[in-house]
Each structure stands twice: as C-alpha cells, then as structure tokens.
Image: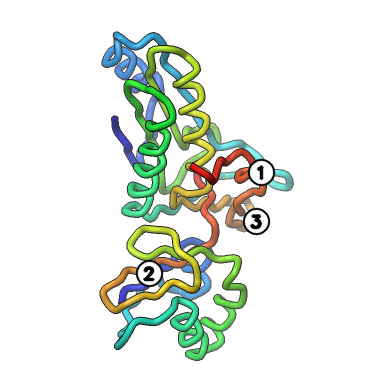
C-alpha cells in the first residue's frame, strides 16, 4: 500500500511484476498507466513540467483511498505519480490494484484515477517550440466523480 | 501565516510562498482583498477568485473559511495531474 511521487522515469513492468508477486493470493491485478501525448489540439508537445504540492497530494490521495477502501474490498494498491520534466511517451502515473475478484480492482482503480484528476495537487504545463501553456482541468474530469462519497 | 502559490498563480505573483501576519482570525476572502491592495500584480492575479482553489492545512476549503496566523493557506488553479 504505497503512494510514491518521483522525478525519475520508471519502468512500469518492474513495479507491476513485483506488485503481482507480492500479492500472489489475489485473483485480480488491475494496472493503469497515464502517459504524455506527443501533441495537444494545436501543438506538438516537447515536454511537460509537472508541479506538485507534495504534502497536500499525500493527504488527499490517502483520503480518497480510504473512502474507496470502504466501498471496494481490495488487497493492495500502488500509486506512482511523477513530477518535474516529463517527455512525450513517458509515464506520468501508474496505478496498480490487487483484489480477490476483478470488479473490485477495476472499479477501485478507475475511481481512484477519476478522483486523482480533480483532487491531487499536481499541475501540468505543456512546453512547445514557441512557448508553453498551463493545462486546465477539463469539465469531463469531474463528470464521473461521485461527490457524495 | 504562510501562504503558498502554485502553477499559473505562482507565475503571475512571481513567488511560491510568503508569510503574512494575521492578528485575529479572518476569512480567506478578506486576506485576498488585502493582498489585492498591495499592487497591480496581486490585483491581476486575484482578479477571478472564484476560478481559484483554496486549501488550509492541506484540506480544500472555500473563500468564506476563517484562517489564523498558525495556518498554512494554499491558493492555486484547479489541479490538472494524472
């Protein structure tokens, strides 16, 4: 049960394999990887800078996880989110969840990602050849959130 | 009280944090109104306070929340991680 914020690149398979071995009694392992796209609607993206308010991100993600753990029976989770400079094709976020049956880990992982988009204190700035732009939170990011949780 | 700024707001104000002195508890909206009086930079940065988010000691709050000198207030645009 770990939440890791790191500047360095990571190889997802290393973490997923280890997580799977650590949870050998779980019947389902869910994993999600969020990556940097090479372009947005108008520009080619050279890199993105991710700013982090670490203390609050820890508090908020733990709070979300505690809520979701009351809703879904899971065995274990791992969250890795990068900050600093990240290039197209590189991973930004990894979520891995273990549970006895698939539905719990699928739903836990999906809802955790939805909440993370609107509560975890990270901000992305996209860098182009001719400037840079802060990324706005999308209306659609809030669409699937069950705020009654 | 420590105030932290993030992302575009940090860029507009030109600093990531500062400390101000609050003698008695105040609403966040009052703190911002006082900051806006400082100069055009703050006035512009806080032009649309409803589009910003606020946190006291790492918990999301609204503009009507009271803060005291020992609090850590963070002000930032809506998050965009993941």
The numbered mark at residue A11 is none
* Eye-nearest disc, 1 or 3: 1
Residue tagged by mark 1?
Answer: A140
In the image shown, does A38 or B1 lie closer to the viewer?
A: B1
The image shows residue A6 at horizontal and vertical percentages of: 34, 41
In the image shown, does A116 or A53 lie closer to the viewer?
A: A116
- Specify the subunit that label 2 lies on: B
For the residues tagged 1 and 2, is the chain the same? no
Q: Relative to residue B72, is residue A93 drawn left or right?
A: right
For the residues tagged 3 and 2, is the chain the same? no
- What crowding class fits label 1: few (fewer than 14 Cα within 10 Å), some (14-19), or many (20 or more)? few
In the image shown, does A72 or A90 lie closer to the viewer?
A: A72
In the rendered view, would you say A23 is above or below B82?
A: above
Residue tagged by mark 2?
Answer: B73
Residue at image position (55%, 76%) is B45
Q: Are marks 3 and 2 in contact (CB under 8 Å)?
A: no
The image shows residue A67 at horizontal and vertical percentages of: 40, 38
Q: Relative to residue B72, is residue B74 drawn left or right?
A: right
């Amino acid at each position: 049960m770990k939440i890791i914020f790191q500047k360095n690149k990571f190889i997802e398979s290393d973490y997923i394999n280890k997580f799977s071995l650590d949870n050998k009694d779980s019947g389902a392992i869910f994993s999600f990887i969020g990556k940097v796209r090479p372009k947005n609607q108008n520009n080619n993206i050279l890199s993105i800078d991710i700013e982090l308010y670490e203390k609050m991100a820890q508090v908020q993600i733990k709070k979300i996880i505690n809520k979701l753990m009351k809703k879904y029976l899971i065995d274990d989770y791992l969250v890795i989110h990068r900050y600093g400079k990240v290039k197209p094709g590189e991973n930004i976020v990894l979520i891995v969840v273990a549970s006895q049956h698939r539905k719990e880990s699928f739903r836990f992982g999906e809802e955790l990602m939805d909440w993370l988009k609107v509560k975890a204190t990270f901000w992305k700035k996209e860098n182009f050849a001719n400037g840079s732009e802060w990324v706005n939170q999308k209306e659609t990011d809030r669409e699937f959130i069950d705020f009654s949780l | 009280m420590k105030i932290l700024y993030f992302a575009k707001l940090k860029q507009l104000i030109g600093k990531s944090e500062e400390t101000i002195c609050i003698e008695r508890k105040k609403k966040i909206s009052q703190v911002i109104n006082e900051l806006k009086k400082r100069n055009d930079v703050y006035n512009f940065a806080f032009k649309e306070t409803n589009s910003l988010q606020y946190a006291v000691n790492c918990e999301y709050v609204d503009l009507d929340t009271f803060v005291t000198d020992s609090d850590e207030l963070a002000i930032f645009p809506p998050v965009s991680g993941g």
